[in-house]
Image: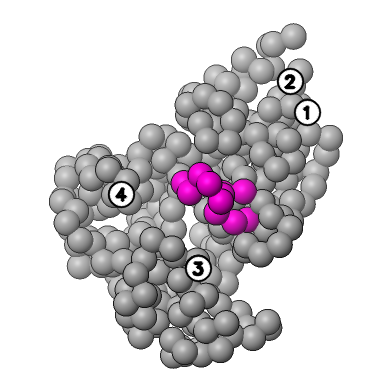
Amino acid sequence: MRFDKYLAEQYPAQTRSQLTAAIKRGDFTVNGQVVKAGYELRATDVVAGELQLPVVGAVAEDIPLDIVYEDDYLMVINKPRGMVVHPGAGVHHGTLLNALLGRGQGNLVRAGIVHRLDKNTAGLLIVAKTLLCQQRLAAMFARHDVTRVYHGLVAGRVAGDLTIDKNIIRHPTHRTIFTTTEHGGRRAVTHLHVLARYAHHTLCEFTLATGRTHQIRVHCRAIGHPLVGDPEYNTGNGQMLEAVQLKFVHPMTHRNIEISIEHTKAFADACNQCYHKK
């Protein structure tokens, strides 16, 4: 398959010209090298990178952020549940990007954002403050050099620790969500560790080996234990999933960085309710 055709399947909302421009910019690499749009992919090729969309039409807003770590090159933000990371789908204000523009980060692609959390997922998120740091962080995420640990409260009693290795693909009829598939899609691997079992729920720790959209949510649904409160893969509003730990080597100073946070009150309250429920 041609490289540009492959990317078109991964980013169906983007035009071919946008993807061709991204290839020329070097947003994506094959086996660590920048290649042309017409490059013929082989089964053993490793594609890495992420589409770097410039900030267009977003406005700077004075929105307070919970910054748990900051230096000259990057910051780690504790994103609240309910905050959208990047404007889109009718949401143009109150996003993390609006807040970062308000802090003067308009000279960076996507205001320095290098990865995302779902709107209803709270927790830790890294943001670059310089272009070089952003490029290095993006490469680290592509190589899975950043350890991200999540805690989630799921329905039912999970029998034990397991690794979920199921490909993920966009849902054929509901285009805003994803599903697992036996054929095609993109490989997704989630390591699940049981932290506590309650009468009808389980508190789990998730570590990502890959970083697919909605990965934990889709995998939990696939094994019959959807996240509590997940509005798209279960029922409710305000899914009980939080990014509680980040571990990485600082791309500029080469220091080992490890940051952990406590659960939000909403998450802790949900666990307490499950504990006391007979």
- Horizontal relation, residue 224 to residue 2: left or right: right
**Of the residues shown, which amino acid type is indicated by label 3?**
Glu
Give neighbour class at mark 1: few <14, some 14-19, many 20+ (Cα, 10 Å): some
Quarter containing the N terminus: bottom right
Residues at circles 2 and 1 in contact by the CB criterion of under 8 Å: yes
- The residue tagged 3 is 9
Q: On the image, which quarter does residue 222 sit in? A: top right
**CA distance for labels 2 and 1:** 6 Å
Kind of residue indicated by mark 4: Gly
Disc 1 element:
loop
Q: Which mark is residue 88?
A: 4
Q: Earlier in the sequence, mark 2 or mark 1?
A: 1
Q: Secondary structure at mark 2?
A: loop
Badge 4 crowding class, 10 Å Cα cut-off, few under 14, some 14 to 19, many 20 or more, is: few
Tell me if residue 236 comes above or below residue 136 in the rendering: above
Disc 3, disc 1: CB below 8 Å? no
For label 1, the residue is 157
Q: Secondary structure at mark 4?
A: loop
For discs 4 and 2, the disc positioned in front in the rendered view: 4
Residue 270: x %, y % from top left: 57, 21
Give residue 20's quadrant in the image. bottom left
Contact (Cβ within 8 Å) of mark 4 with mark 1: no
Residue range in magenta is 168-179
Residue 197 position, x and y percent, is 76, 26
Residues at discs 3 and 4 in contact (Cβ within 8 Å): no
Q: CA distance from mark 4 to mark 1?
A: 36 Å
Given this view, does label 3 or label 2 mark the residue nearer the observer? 3
- Mark 3 vs mark 4: which is more N-terminal? 3
Residue on which the image places disc 2 = 200
